[in-house]
Amino acid sequence: MAPTVILLSLLTFIIVLVGEATTSPSLKKIATTASYNSNYTQASSSATGSGRARVKARTTSAYENTSPTKVSRFSKAIKPTEATTRALKPTEESTKPEATTRDSKHTTIKPPKTSKVTKKTLKPTEVSTKALKPTTVKPTLATTKTTATPVRFNTEDLNENIDKNVERRVWNTKSDEPPFFECPPLGLESLKVKDSQMQASSYERIGLGPHRGRLNIQSGVEDGDIYDGAWCAQYKDQNQWLQIAANKLTRFTAVIIQGRSSIWSWNFVETFKVQVSNDTIKWKACMNGTEEAVFEGNKDTETAVLAVLPEPAVAQYIRINPQTWFKNGTICLRAEIMGCELSDPNNIYPWQAEEGTKDKLDFRHHNYKEMRKLMKSVNEMCPDITRIYSIGKSYMGLKLYVMEISDNPGKHELGEPEFRYVAGMHGNEVLGRELVLNLMEYICQEYKRENERIVRLVKETRIHLLPSMNPDGYEMAYKKGSELAGWALGRYSYEGIDMNHNFADLNTIMWDAIELETDKSKLINHYFPIPEYYTSEDAMVASETRAVISWMQNIPFVLSANLHGGELVVTYPFDMTKDWAPKEHTPTADESFFRWLATVYASTNHVMSNPDRRPCHNEDFLRYNNIINGADWHTVPGSMNDFSYLHTNCFEVTVELSCDKFPHASELPLEWENNKESLIVYMEQVHRGIKGVVKDKDTEAGIADAVIKVDDIDHHIRSAFDGDFWRLLNPGDYDVTVTAEGYMPATRSCRVEYEHYPTICDFHLTKTPKQRLREILAKGGKVPKDLQLRLREMRMRKLRATTKLINQRRASKKRKTRGAHY
């Protein structure tokens, strides 16, 4: 009878076990996490008169509690289909060319409505890459993270020709090359020309002084900001001028001017004259035959207009003399001067060789076709350590190429961290694109030269370089050229989407969950699932954004940086403020390590680390040591930094590389030298902290999706599909706990040293008795005696605990009854 009793008891326990499994708190938590309801509307802001009216409309993200009696205060939120476009889908009014809007940093002009007309006239074969059809060129996004075997991105053959339909769509004009300039810019926009070299006849105030007359300089955004984007004369007459000292004998060839960048005023110069001098006493007018030349100026505030001098003028000084201006405004302009420096033995300034670099790299601007050629040449030069693959296509059908650099390309190696650089999210911020292409060349060359630092980096790291996330936008800016592209042309995708706001807003989901959940133990702090609305066909999500998200989900990246332009600063998460404030310091749980990452890049960048450098536009980031919390600069909902941190294991920062979004080709060697060390040392930070492998104690098999918790840091990570993990940490002592479904938790202390090597912290987990029983029964095996005894002990403990609780309740009830009688 004894074996029969044991068997019946065992079967009863299994039935109880199955029932518990379906209602266990951990599974409830997972189910609850997957059922986020993220319905929300974007906060909006508008600027009118002298103030900015900001409207906060936050009806966001009900965290669905397991308690049936709890009612969410967001239960009346708008339908998912109404929230999908959020602030990302431009309306017809917002896409008019003359309507300006604030971007994440400065005033810009949104893409014209003509892009919508173009979409309507495309042939059926030409809309196969439409962003709203995820079954074509976009991968389908999973709403939750998975650690199953990842999708392999196949190697690309760049010998293949570009698709003819794509050729016709992208390069359908007579000339795809930018205008050719005989001479490069003097450097008003890039700040090569110092403030002291700029003078004016008069100016309204210091914030509109001659030093503000630089091409593409941006205004302040705060009420009463003293800085505005232009030089503005104090008087309205034809005797006003802006003067630039070249400080060297220069052959002036052209002048480029813009109107005033301002959220308050509308000013531009319609016609102007040009004079030159060698001593600022005698001035010679630029002539058009026998008459003084009058050049056509601006018709709006943003479009850069080129005025080529009828005959090049050799001098040291040049003046722009406005003749007519917007009738309801005043004299305001931003400018760049094109000129070739000449050798002058009588010049009081000693001739100095132009700064540059000794590296022999391809320093020029590469359009899509030239980028393919360069990547192909690097791959052919270093076939053993490089591989080229594509993660998807742009709206127009251009492939998003990635260069992989590793000693074993094409394969994730156990324990080897994955790193990525992403450039060109905004297509007109081109310096990052060129730096990433130069980095490919440099690593290949130095590896072949057996540079120890580069060899170690390649052998210990799997590096992924995406030079152009927005190739469609780049091609638009490239065709205009460095000086004429303006501040906004090419920033957006072809559909008019700003990809820097296009990732799923997981911040709001997290903060609403914290606000609504009374039981904090049920909250998650990592791997937030993507809301269902975001993956629908109606969601205004760029095909490029979808491709990058799929890339993130399939490769266990540890560290990343995305490269932008237009400022000199490194920003770190969070990028979005908690209550939709315009800006507010909003730290992550890993604030200290993010500050370290940002400081590593900024402190080794030659320009950022220069204490005497001039601020780019209206904010002086030197006072913050050239790093800042992204939300403390300006709030950016749906940023890639925040998404990467909340949805994956990867830590990511944004690097604003230069004041000039589109530097002239002649400035690229110096820009490479300014950033070379920063690019390399930042990659090396992927080896800080701890790393290890989570394995099954019995089988030694890697355990995927194990949760790695660091005490006192409320942000966990998970092991990859092979069981390996990397946790970025500053030096110190940490208690680390690893948990996995079906296993007993394990804790150990790990010390992180100051060296550039991670601390190895491996974990071997033991299966729980319940998990062992499940596996044995699934295989039809016999339950061993030790497991039977263990399960019996667990059952008895549970019965004793239940009995004790029942007795306590009975005793309490009796006491209450006796009290009632008295």
Image (tube, rainbow, N blue to C red):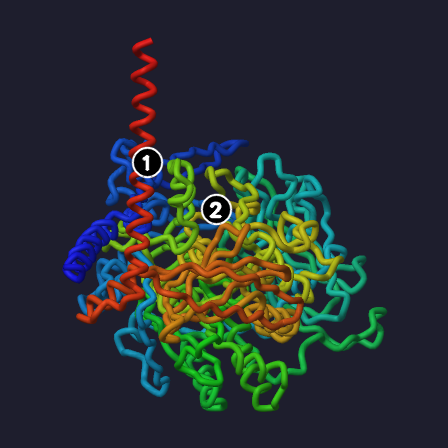
**Label 2, label 1: how far apart the Cα atoms are:** 47 Å
Q: Nearer the viewer, residue 813 or 631?
A: 813
Tell me which corner region of the image, top left, top right, bottom left or bottom right, holds residue 789.
bottom left
100 above or below 446?
above
Hey, what amino acid is under mark 2? Answer: Met
Apparent side of residue 339 relative to residue 806 in the rendered image (left or right)? right
Tell me which corner region of the image, top left, top right, bottom left or bottom right, holds residue 325.
top right
Q: Is residue 721 visible?
A: yes
Dot 2: element: loop
Task: Identify the residue at image location x=32%, y=54%.
Answer: 793
Task: Identify the residue at image location x=29%, y=73%.
Answer: 166
| Quarter of the image that includes the N terminus | bottom left
Circle 1 crowding by C-alpha within 10 Å: few under 14, some 14–19, many from 20: few
Q: Nearer the viewer, residue 712 or 216?
A: 712
Circle 2 crowding by C-alpha within 10 Å: few under 14, some 14–19, many from 20: many
Task: Identify the residue at image location x=32%, y=56%.
Answer: 541
Disc 1: which residue: 805
Q: Are marks 2 and 1 in contact (CB under 8 Å)?
A: no
On residue 576, the disc is 2
Q: Is residue 567 visible?
A: no
Q: Nearer the viewer, residue 775 or 463?
A: 775
Residue 550, percent across and down?
A: 34, 65
